[in-house]
Image: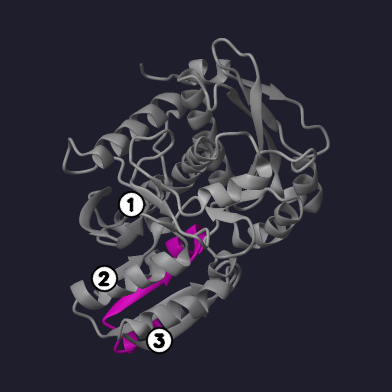
């Protein structure tokens, strides 16, 4: 049955969250015949520059909770949650951890995750995060809801070296977080893949010299540009890139393939190649992964009247990991959940899972990612990585 936004909302009962600066601050998902609930918390960006991503994450979480509860819950109980705005800092995380929930889901941003993860570890609570920073791998109770930079960067670099037939690469990266801390890791991955970095340009959000910065890539001998900028800066760069009629291929990560970014960028993003977490319209119908990805996309569109993107998939997956960890553990025990998740292998089609997924002993996630090219505003699959 297709979920509508009204049906979804009927199972998600909001509470006030006064003093934390958001409206839909907390929600509880109620199964058809509730008897008891297993509670978890999430801290996510609901205001500030990443509010759009945070809302997409929350949508994915809500959809997964609704579906799992409609199917009978976990360990015979429904899932319930509270949602807090990570923009309120330590106070939001502290509130989310009192009393200790079964897990802390989120946040998406690397800096926010670095703040939340030590607090979750001190409370002996698993932190299932959508952040990608490589320094979070192996940190206490952190488990990823997406392959992190330690997985994604070598895959993308290896694909560029092996499939694009390029040797000299230029990088345009953001000088603020997360671009600054991720920059060194990208450089290492590109060099390990045998690529020569002939341009390495940090771009500030308020830079007025974008014309000259883009022009430097034209004057250099780069054969491809790796674009590692947040959406607004990536759009400025691409517009100037096209205005100067540069013919060099542009490669990026999931930011450049987000449905709203593609719709806004229009022709500017045409031909850009990106690594993404999932495919809303996957090829090879009939496989478990294709069925799970397409089914998730259809249900998400029906519930929220928009296209799913990377943050929404990560939120959906985070709840799937929580459910799988509890099933493996066999009891509701926040202290044992992180250990139960590590080493876990989950098949596509399991609750909250759209791809075959493995959680390594370090808490890193390994599952396929996809190289796509934007053609006529749509992603076209080039390769499956991993």
Q: Nearer the viewer, residue 261 or 334?
A: 334
Q: Which residue is denoted by mark 1 in the rendering?
A: 266
Single out the residue that lies furthest toward the front. Answer: 330
Disc 3 or disc 2, which is closer to the eye?
A: 2
Around disc 2, counting alpha carbons within 10 Å, would you say few (fewer than 14), some (14 to 19), or many (20 or more)?
Answer: some
Residue under the image location 52 percent in, 61 percent down: 132
Around disc 1, counting alpha carbons within 10 Å, would you say few (fewer than 14), some (14 to 19), or many (20 or more)?
Answer: few
Q: Nearer the viewer, residue 249 or 74?
A: 74
**Residue 334, relative to residue 150: is it above or below?**
above
* Residue 300 coordinates in the image, percent (x, y): 41, 31
Callout 2: helix, strand or loop? helix
Work out whether mark 3 precedes mark 1 in sequence or the reverse, and give the earlier one: 3
Around disc 3, counting alpha carbons within 10 Å, would you say few (fewer than 14), some (14 to 19), or many (20 or more)?
Answer: some
Q: CA distance from mark 3 to mark 1?
A: 27 Å
| Residue contact between numbered discs 1 and 2, judged by CB atoms under 8 Å | no
Q: Which residue is denoted by mark 2 in the rendering?
A: 159
Work out whether mark 3 precedes mark 2 in sequence or the reverse, and give the earlier one: 2
Q: Which mark is residue 275?
A: none
* Residue 369 coordinates in the image, percent (x, y): 33, 56
Magenta region: which residues? 215-235
């Amino acid at each position: 049955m297709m979920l509508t936004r009204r049906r979804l909302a009927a199972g998600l009962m909001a509470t006030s969250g006064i003093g934390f600066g958001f409206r839909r601050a907390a929600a509880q998902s109620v199964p058809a015949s509730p008897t008891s609930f297993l509670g978890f918390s999430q801290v996510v960006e609901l205001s500030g520059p990443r509010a759009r991503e945070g809302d997409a994450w929350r949508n994915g979480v809500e959809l997964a909770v609704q579906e799992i509860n409609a199917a009978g819950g976990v360990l015979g109980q429904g899932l319930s949650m509270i949602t807090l705005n990570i923009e309120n800092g330590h106070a939001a995380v502290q509130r989310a951890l009192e009393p200790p929930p079964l897990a802390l889901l989120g946040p998406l941003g690397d800096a926010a995750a670095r703040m939340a993860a030590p607090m979750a570890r001190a409370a002996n609570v698993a932190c299932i995060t959508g952040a990608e920073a490589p320094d979070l791998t192996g940190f206490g109770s952190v488990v990823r809801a997406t392959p992190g930079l330690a997985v994604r960067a070598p895959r993308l670099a290896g694909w560029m070296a092996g499939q694009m037939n390029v040797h000299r690469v230029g990088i345009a990266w953001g000088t603020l977080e997360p671009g600054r801390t991720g920059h060194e890791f990208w450089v290492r991955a590109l060099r390990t893949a045998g690529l020569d970095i002939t341009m390495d340009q940090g771009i500030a959000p308020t830079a007025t010299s974008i014309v000259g910065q883009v022009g430097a890539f034209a004057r250099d001998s780069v054969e491809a540009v790796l674009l590692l900028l947040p959406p607004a800066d990536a759009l400025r760069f691409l517009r100037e890139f096209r205005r100067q009629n540069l013919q060099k291929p542009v490669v990026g990560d999931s930011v450049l393939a987000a449905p709203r970014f593609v719709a806004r960028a229009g022709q500017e993003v045409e031909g850009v190649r990106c690594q993404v977490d999932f495919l809303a319209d996957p090829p090879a119908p009939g496989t478990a992964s294709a069925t799970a990805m397409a089914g998730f996309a259809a249900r998400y569109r029906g519930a929220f009247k928009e296209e799913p993107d990377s943050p929404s998939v990560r939120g959906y997956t985070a709840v799937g990991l929580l459910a799988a960890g509890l099933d493996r553990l066999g009891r509701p025990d926040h202290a044992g959940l992180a250990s139960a998740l590590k080493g876990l292998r989950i098949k596509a089609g399991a609750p909250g899972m759209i791809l075959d997924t493995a959680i390594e002993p370090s808490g890193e996630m390994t599952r396929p990612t996809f190289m796509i090219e934007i053609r006529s505003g749509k992603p076209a699959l080039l390769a499956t990585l991993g």
